Image (tube, rainbow, N blue to C red):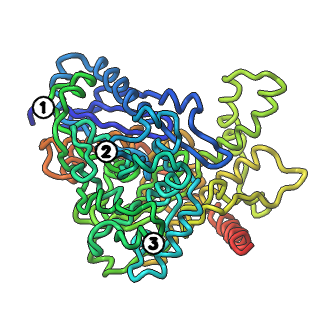
């Protein structure tokens, strides 16, 4: 194969990562990370009201910086041979736009209005709106939540857009449409941001916007207007068709070619959701469960449509034809908090250090490693504390943003490492509940692959997950699997590889390690898991 290079860009919750990759063999030439400056400064967010917003300029400025930095590492010769670039982003992370597709926060009159900014995936401010969508959809002639597990989430686009329109009347005259972060990035780099012509990711539309071919695309305008007249006209201003991963979106505009130090002929792939693209990077195949484990988790399975026999899986985040690899149904589930729970506990432990002892950043960063070291010495026991992993609500099974976490079984003998292990076990129990929902719905899980920061950094958590699930867990070798998946999609969009599967086979990195379940721990964890389920049922009922 001719020497071709591609760029994969992964927009995360806190930062953007860039990989420069040899499309022939997946060799990673260079990588860089850039944190969003406004987000890092804590702007436009209010954790007390579950409001998490990101300014569009954070994305654009950080994209420019991170790509230039990565290209500097490569040298001029490789930089001139970049053939294509593609992206993944968090989702649902939408923003209201004007009739030209400009995010409202980029208009001077709305520049400091959080409701005019991108609403990050974990923004839970739209609980009321999600409730209204579910109530209306379940009595409508078409249940638009049918392929979203039967429950629409406050994390998703229609709830967030409606909440922003209700909360900020000053936006209504300019609000013409909305766009997901992944679609906007591809659109702005190719100069196609008009709401009706911009290419839209089927991955994002199907899982988060209730798009489905069987009802002609997005929910009907009649439904949206009945939900709230503020949504009148939105469907007409949006799209009916969507595109699968690896789709060619166009070439770089002259402006963006200059800003990124790339040539104008560089091809741009349509973006998609990070966990789905990460599954591609992890070399997902049918009936293999890929778990993206970070601040939260996202679980992805692909199955052949014939295996589904027109069945609908209840209580998951969605099932969408072609959302991961064309020709296969993509099934999504996940946990609203995973690493965030450990970070919360670290903050709890660090509070006296910070406010009484004047600790250094180094001492705070040592908390999790030290807790992990001590927790690993503990044996699982049925008398251990039991925690419920719903500190940020429950995503699946059966979404409930009002669900709350709990810790039970604490005594005067309970130590910080014991509590930390209980939290790690709780996140593993939540993961097992997702696995069991799939298997209960007759979806086979033949293999499990883990990607994300925790998969690489915490042997304790990964071993507990294997013990609790009773399944071996492979850890993908690449530490930047989402960016690698985006690079694979770029190679397809750029015409270097003919299909996602071909790109996976050529560019995949395999696995770094495998965690096998310890049979001695299995009986104990089965008993603890039953307690976890009973506590969860109690809180659901009360």
Crowding at mark 1 (Cα within 10 Å: few <14, some 14-19, many 20+): some
Circle 3 is placed at which residue position? Answer: 226
Q: Residue at x 42, y 38 (%)?
A: 479
Q: Is 338 rendered above or below residue 134? A: above
Q: Is 162 rendered above or below residue 56? A: below
Between marks 1 and 3, how big is the CA–CA gap?
46 Å
Q: Secondary structure at mark 2?
A: loop
The numbered mark, 2 or 3, whose residue comes first in the sequence reads 2
Say whether marks 2 and 3 touch (CB < 8 Å): no
Q: Secondary structure at mark 3?
A: helix
Circle 2 is placed at which residue position? Answer: 101
Residue extending furthest right? Answer: 412
Between marks 2 and 3, how big is the CA–CA gap?
25 Å
Horizontal and vertical percent for residue 238? 30, 57
The numbered mark, 1 or 2, whose residue comes first in the sequence reads 2
Q: Residue at x 17, y 46 (%)?
A: 248
Say whether marks 1 and 2 touch (CB < 8 Å): no
């Amino acid at each position: 194969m001719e020497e071709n290079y591609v760029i994969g860009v992964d927009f995360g919750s806190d930062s953007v990562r860039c990989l420069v990759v040899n499309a022939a063999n997946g060799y990673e030439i260079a990588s860089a990370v850039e944190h969003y400056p406004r987000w890092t400064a804590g702007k436009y967010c209010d954790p007390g009201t579950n409001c998490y917003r990101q300014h569009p300029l954070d994305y654009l400025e950080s994209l420019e910086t991170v790509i230039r930095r990565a290209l500097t590492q490569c040298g001029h010769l490789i930089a001139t041979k970049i053939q294509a670039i593609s992206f993944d982003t968090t989702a649902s992370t939408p923003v209201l736009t004007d009739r030209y597709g400009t995010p409202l926060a980029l208009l001077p009159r709305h520049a400091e209005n959080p409701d005019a900014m991108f609403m990050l995936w974990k923004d839970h401010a739209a609980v009321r709106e999600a409730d209204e969508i579910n109530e209306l959809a379940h009595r409508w002639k078409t249940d638009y939540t049918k392929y979203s597990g039967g429950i629409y989430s406050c994390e998703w686009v229609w709830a967030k857009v409606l909440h922003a329109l209700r909360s900020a009347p000053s936006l209504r005259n300019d609000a013409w449409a909305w766009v997901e972060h992944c679609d906007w990035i591809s659109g702005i780099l190719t100069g196609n941001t008009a709401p009706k012509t911009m290419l839209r990711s089927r991955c994002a539309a199907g899982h988060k916007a209730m798009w489905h071919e069987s009802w002609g695309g997005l929910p009907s305008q009649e439904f949206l207007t009945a939900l709230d007249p503020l949504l009148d006209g939105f469907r007409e201003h949006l799209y009916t068709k969507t595109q699968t991963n690896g789709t060619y979106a166009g070439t770089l505009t002259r402006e963006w070619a200059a800003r990124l130090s790339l040539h104008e002929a560089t091809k741009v792939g349509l973006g998609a959701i990070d966990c789905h693209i990460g599954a591609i990077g992890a070399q997902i195949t049918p009936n293999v469960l890929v778990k993206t484990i970070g601040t939260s988790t996202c679980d992805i399975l692909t199955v052949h449509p014939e295996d589904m026999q027109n069945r609908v899986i209840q209580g998951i985040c969605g099932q969408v034809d072609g959302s991961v690899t064309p020709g296969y149904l993509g099934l999504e589930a996940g946990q609203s908090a995973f690493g965030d729970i450990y970070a919360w506990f670290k903050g709890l432990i660090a509070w006296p250090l910070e406010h009484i002892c004047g600790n250094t950043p180094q001492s705070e960063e040592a908390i999790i490693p030290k807790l992990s070291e001590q927790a690993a010495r503990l044996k699982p026991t049925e008398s251990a504390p039991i925690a419920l992993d719903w500190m940020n609500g429950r995503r699946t099974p059966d979404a409930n943003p009002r669900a709350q976490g709990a810790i039970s079984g604490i005594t005067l003998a309970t130590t910080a490492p014991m509590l930390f292990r209980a939290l790690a076990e709780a996140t593993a129990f939540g993961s097992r509940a997702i696995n069991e929902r799939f298997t209960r719905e007759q979806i086979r899980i033949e293999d499990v692959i883990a990607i994300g920061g925790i998969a690489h950094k915490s042997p304790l958590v990964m071993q507990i997950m294997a013990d609790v699930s009773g399944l071996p867990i492979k850890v993908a070798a690449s530490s930047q699997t989402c960016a690698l998946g985006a690079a694979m999609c770029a190679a397809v969009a750029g015409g270097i590889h003919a299909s996602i599967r071909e790109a996976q086979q050529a560019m995949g990195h395999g696995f770094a390690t495998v965690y096998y379940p310890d049979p001695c721990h299995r009986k104990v964890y089965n008993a603890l898991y039953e307690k976890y389920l009973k506590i969860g049922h109690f809180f659901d009922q009360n």
